[in-house]
Amino acid sequence: KSPLLKVSDLKQHFALKKEAIFQPKQVVKAVDGINFDLYPGETLSIVGESGCGKSTTGRSILRLDEPTDGDVLFKGESLLKMNKKELRNVRGNIQVIFQDPYASLNPRRTIRQMLEEAMAIQKVLPPNQREARMLELMKHVGLRPEYLERYPHEFSGGQRQRIGIARALAVNPEIIICDEAVSALDVSIQAQILNLLKKLQKDYDLTFLFISHDLSVVRHISDRVMVMYLGKVVEIADKSSLFNNPMHPYTKALLSAIPVIDETKRRERIILKGDVPSPINPPTGCRFHTRCPFATERCRQEEPLLREVDTNHSVACHFAEELLS
Ligand code: SF4
Ligand code: MG
């Protein structure tokens, strides 16, 4: 299968404002040369601690932040080379759902007005067929039809996320980027929304890029998982390989911090030293070396490349094989 989305050497560097004339120019390397493919019908999750570049990756793909380098191909066509009009047409195919739907819902518009507007902009269906479509959408996301006449403030967090999903679906997207889409919700509501997303994925043939800091959520929804650290991809694999056989010390540390269902599968705990370093001057060599219990001199000098160590399982660590146990 050919990928729906192909991200190559994507970079997002932000120059910081100089505080003083003599201060050297500082650049935040939020995303620093990442590659991955997104295949039709799959859910690929991006995980990592806050500041690892996962949200920036989503925003760069959509050009909400203009990438500084690299390319993003949608069905073989460069999104970054498109003009505004071409991009607007493609944007109907790639929708985004954010953590806080309230912030992205206009408080002065009813749900009906929002859905109508979204469909009108993307010219989805002739106007006389939009009513039926709206009712279908409301049903599919689990909201009553009379809610169409209400305003965002009249809904709970979970309901608002359903509205956000309905609005995304209104334009017939192929890809939905979910950026911490369930992070603000209670655990029970989270499960409802995750199950809804899974069901809609089947019904509407959707592909998800699912950005989350929460590994339990990721375990629930993903087919593949990509782990980021300080603007780099450190590991990418099928979900089961990643959860059962993590290879990168950072992934192992993240996983050893979450509860396991089967206690016999409890792995040795890797406790990370310190905090995530600043992306302004990231550590040399392997960016994880300042926190890695296995770091050697080589790690401080030489950057490990992402390489396929097992079938569909790539990792960026010099010692991935040796650390397997
Ligand atoms: Fe740790 Fe070295 Fe592997 Fe980086 S390359 S994860 S520092 S062992
Ligand atoms: Mg974020």
Image: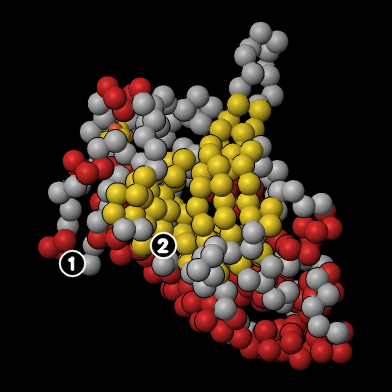
Residue 184 seen by the camera: no
Which disc is residue 224 wearing?
2
| Residue at left offset 72%, top offset 89% | 135
294 displayed left or right of 162: left
Which image quarter has ligand 1? Answer: top left
Return the x and y of residue 139 as percentages of the image width and height.
63, 88
* Residue farthest to the top, as pictured: 22
Q: Residues within 10 Å of mark 1 (few under 14, many from 20)?
A: few
Disc 1 from disc 2: Cα separation: 22 Å
Q: Residue furthest left?
A: 264
Q: Nearer the viewer, mark 1 or mark 2?
A: 2
Kind of residue sitting beneath label 2: Arg
Secondary structure beneath disc 2? strand
Label 2 Cα neighbours within 10 Å, binned few <14 / some 14-19 / many ≥20: many
**Residue 121, position as x, y percentages in the image:** 84, 69
Q: Position of residue 87 (x, y in %)?
A: 77, 57
243 lies left or right of 141? left
**Position above or below: 145 against 288:** below
Task: Give the residue pinned by disc 1.
Answer: 262
Tags 1 and 2 touching, CB below 8 Å:
no
The mark tally for this picture is: 2
In the image, what residue type sits under mark 1? Asp
Q: Label 1's element? A: loop
